Amino acid sequence: MKNAVDNSDGTRTFHFHQDDVHDFAWVASRRMGEVRARFDEPGYHPVDIRLLIQPEHSHLSARYVEATKIALRSYGTWSAPYPYDQVTVVDPAWTSASGGMEYPTLFTGGASVFSPPALQSPESVTIHECGHQFWYLLVGTNEFEEAWLDEGINSYHDEKAAQIALGPEGWGKRYFGMLAAGRGSRAPIPVVAPGVWLRRGDSEVAGLRKSGAFDAMARPTWGYRNADSYTVNAYTKPALSLQPLEGLVGDEVMTRILRTYALRYRFAHPTTEDFIAVVNEVAGQDYRWFFDQTWFSAEECDYAIEVRNRPARALAGYAEGPDGRPVLVPSAREEGRGSDVRTFDSEVIVRRLGGVRLPVEIRVQLTDGRVVYESWDGQYRWTRFRYPGARVRAADVDPFGKIALDIDPGNNSWADNAPIAQRAASKWAMRWMFWLQNFLELHTLLG
Amino acid sequence: MILDAARRGLRRAGALWGLVAFLLLVNLATAAILAIPLAARLRDDLANHAAADNMLAGFDYPWWSAWSDARPETTFGPDILGAGFAFKNLDLLLRGRLPAGLFTMPDPERPEERGTPFDPAVLALGVAYLVLQVFLSGGVIAALRAPQPDWTVRGLLHGSGFYFGRLLRLALLMLLVDAVVFAIYGPFARWADVQAREAVSERTAIAWMLGRHALLLLALIAVNMLSSYARVLIVLEERSSALLALLSAGTLCLGSFFRTFGHVLLMTGLAVAGLLLWSLLDGHWTTNGYKTQIVTFLLLEGLVFVRLFFRVATLGGQVTLARRLAGGPAEAA
């Protein structure tokens, strides 16, 4: 704020000034408390953090501030440092429907009175909205025509930042809310499921399964089929697609790509083609094919693996000998070996069930202790790997989870684990039965 | 009198622990009707997937997410873990999803949707269980009313069969009463939600949201109390008219509201304390082998047993209170 002038009519005029911004917003409230903090770390421009917080959320102040610092630190490294002297974080009022929004040097978060740390709220929305400062504000892409360049890249970064700084996110459900949950309202009582942890991208894949095939990602927002398609194509799909790109080029190159893009196009309103050009330039290869498969396509990505372990068929009868002449090979029975032969011939078949064609890694673990890594370009519908004289214990396509776009990660692995499946099934059926027993007993409250 | 009724009820339930164990077997066998097929389905779906290893060691969320998307009506999910099962069930009750979705309150902005999909087999089993418990309640009360609590399976079934017609008519009447409660509650809930939405502070909104849920729960507990006393009167006084028994129960409860409702709230509080104690124990070890599964099974069934024990103890206390408040002969200590 530059100054505040009292006027003769009893009003007061505030003058604010900020260089290099393309929008402004203001907030006023009788109820908000103010918390001041400072982000001052080596290699970064110091930033004054001003948190305006609802009184009932004051116990979350430290979490809001820490999340803002995580964003300033992470995004400052992965794109370009935040250049302004201050940032205002606003904890929105109950049902104001103003949460989760971003403006130059000001953004709104969103919190609830009961906020278990495992659910990473308000951290996740704070990191995301602060992250918009780096994309929506400093790069300034067109949010109507190419929403993914801001929301998508930001979502990719905010999940990465949260995973590194806060660890995996817990899973929870909120209870006893309103009959019609409107924007800005949440059910009050959160219950965190013990032992359930979500890695980066886990919670987004369901949306991709539901609405990912409706539209190609690269469309103007008004061209999407419905609100779900907009959410998937603006946020989910670009964020998930940048993970396999990161897997292809490596984390260091990916960081250089985004830093080059952010610095070169600061305040320059780049387009998707500009981004792709930067990817190709920094990676040193043409990755247009990748974007054709993911951004400019409505196809789904789904790889699956299956294994066949068959007892090796022993050769018997006449066969070609080493000198090319027929040789009589005695059968195992004739040799007295019996049918107790324990050699296997195995094959691993990897299938591409979706339309997206990406190169994939395959890891095959054999019972003799060997681990074999294969690769496949993913172009045809399937490929096969044979292992004569060996038995496969386990096999995975995309073993390191780089292809976050895969809509069914469950079919990416095979294991010779029937007894384990039995035990896991009985374990969870027992737990479900316990829920059902209590559900049934609750009926005695009625009637 | 409340504490004395509670003590007597607990003592009677303790003397009839075999009956409680029988009720547990009935509950377990009913649930097993759907649990066994689920176990088979999970075994087949997990076989030859690495997710089986993950599910044995913990919970494989990506696998479950795809699995449940293919089965939108499924009730198997992470929301049943830990104490979550109690919140899930309470939420279903207070949204009118029990029994069989009869009293479901739709989202006022999307009235054509009747709530998220729910496994119809589970709902049907709930109705069957309700009828089964109505049948058994006559025999249970008959066992509780005896001067020296004792029971046999034959005696239980004989008593259950003898009173079933009357108790079934009463149960249908009580469902009508529940319907009235939900019919009155619906508009009140929408009004309370408006107040919550208009609140300046989230704390005020929480008070409105939790307050209206608590009111409904108390109302359902009160209706259940009425039903319980009506059943007790049918058995104690050999009443043949369910409606008249209900009216007598109403008079009894209203005439001594603080005693009757206080007793029910005390027993409910004890059961909740049992749940809290259980939740402290649950999850302290990983269930990944047959031995740990047995330990976990015992802990889970232990809680169900405690719950059934408190139900029988509450009925026992209500038998005591009904006798005292109706001016009947004093029970032996």
Image: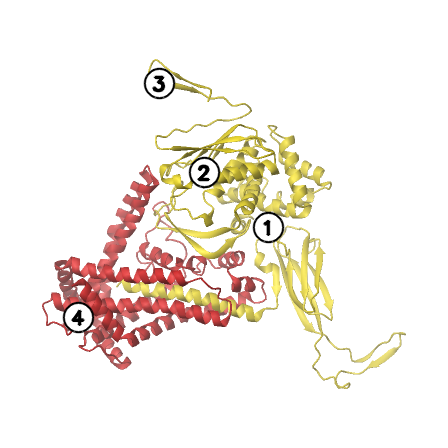
Chain colours: A yellow, B red
Residue that numbered label 2 is attached to: A109
Q: Residue at x 31, y 38 (%)?
A: B199
Q: CA distance from mark 3 to mark 2?
A: 30 Å
Q: Tell which subunit mark 1 falls on.
A: A
Is the residue marked by circle 1 packed among few (<14), some (14-19), or many (20+) residues within 10 Å? many
Q: Earlier in the sequence, mark 3 or mark 2?
A: 3
Q: Residue at x 67, y 69 (%)?
A: A367
- Which element carries disc 4, helix, strand or loop? helix
Is the residue marked by circle 3 packed among few (<14), some (14-19), or many (20+) residues within 10 Å? few
Q: Name the amino acid type tagged 4.
A: Ile
Q: Earlier in the sequence, mark 1 or mark 2?
A: 2
Is the residue marked by circle 4 packed among few (<14), some (14-19), or many (20+) residues within 10 Å? many
Q: Tell which subunit mark 2 falls on.
A: A
The quadrant in which the C terminus of chain A is found is bottom left
For residue B201, which numbered disc appears in the image? none
Q: Name the amino acid type tagged 2.
A: Gly
Marks 4 & 2, CB-CB < 8 Å contact: no
Marks 4 & 1, CB-CB < 8 Å contact: no
Q: CA distance from mark 4 to mark 1?
A: 63 Å
Vertical comparison of A269 with A210: above or below: above
Q: Name the amino acid type tagged 3.
A: Thr
Q: Nearer the viewer, residue A232 or B262?
A: B262
Q: CA distance from mark 4 to mark 2?
A: 59 Å
Residue B4 locus on image (x, y percent): 18, 66
Residue that numbered label 1 is attached to: A404
